[in-house]
Amino acid sequence: MPEELHWIGLILNKSALPRDIVLREAKTSDAQLLYEWVNSADSLAASLITSNPIPWDEHCDWLATKIADPGSIIWIAKTGGQVAGSIRLVTKSTELEIAIYVDPAMRKSGIALSMLKKARETARADGMHLPLIARILRKNKASLRLFEKAGYRFDKDHADHIVLRLNK
């Protein structure tokens, strides 16, 4: 295949994007980006905690608290020099609760699965060996499929959400 056709194929086929994910810890300077993501309509629709936009001051206080909390970590995911989304882990006594947000420009590219894999690998390398769980609204079929594809399995059933667990 001529090289120019190869590059056109890469541009048209997002699934051909590189899957090398780099995770870095979130900083207070990421507040605006995370604020935009958390208050996006799709994020609010998928949230177990709130369906209303979060005020800026509350968001900044929350972020500062999470950054300072040794039982919590927020990673900004990047691939190919582009921001891909965020992953949050929170220690809940005997498990790590994981949450993911994929930037809309990166969706439907397979990047979310790579982000989950990298988060698991990084957590394990950092000594976090508790089982990972995800709490997902029943109506969020895309997230349910994503986590199941990543190896998470049904754990608990709640009125409004399902808990999936990864024991690896």
Image (spheres, rainbow, N blue to C red):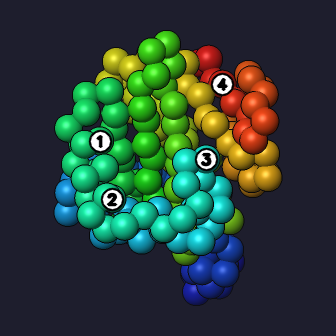
What kind of residue is marked 1? Lys
What kind of residue is marked 4? Arg
What kind of residue is marked 3? Leu
Question: Are discs 2 and 4 less than 8 Å apart at CB?
Answer: no
Farthest top residue?
Answer: 94
Badge 4 element? strand
What kind of residue is marked 2? His
Characterize the local packing of mark 1: few (<14), some (14-19) or many (20 or more) Cα atoms within 10 angstroms: some
According to the picture, the residue beneath numbered tag 1 turns out to be: 66
Q: Position of residue 1 (x, y in %)?
A: 68, 77
The CA span between labels 2 and 4 is 28 Å
According to the picture, the residue beneath numbered tag 3 turns out to be: 48
Lower sequence index among marks 1 and 4: 1
| Mark 2 or 1, closer to the camera | 2
The CA span between labels 2 and 3 is 16 Å
Badge 3 element? loop
Q: Is residue 80 visible?
A: no
According to the picture, the residue beneath numbered tag 2 turns out to be: 59
According to the picture, the residue beneath numbered tag 4 turns out to be: 165
Lower sequence index among marks 3 and 4: 3
Write down the quadrant of residue 35 in the picture: bottom left
The CA span between labels 3 and 4 is 17 Å
Q: Position of residue 164 (x, y in %)?
A: 69, 30
Badge 2 element? helix
The residue shown at (55%, 25%) is 132
Q: Position of residue 83 (x, y in %)?
A: 40, 65
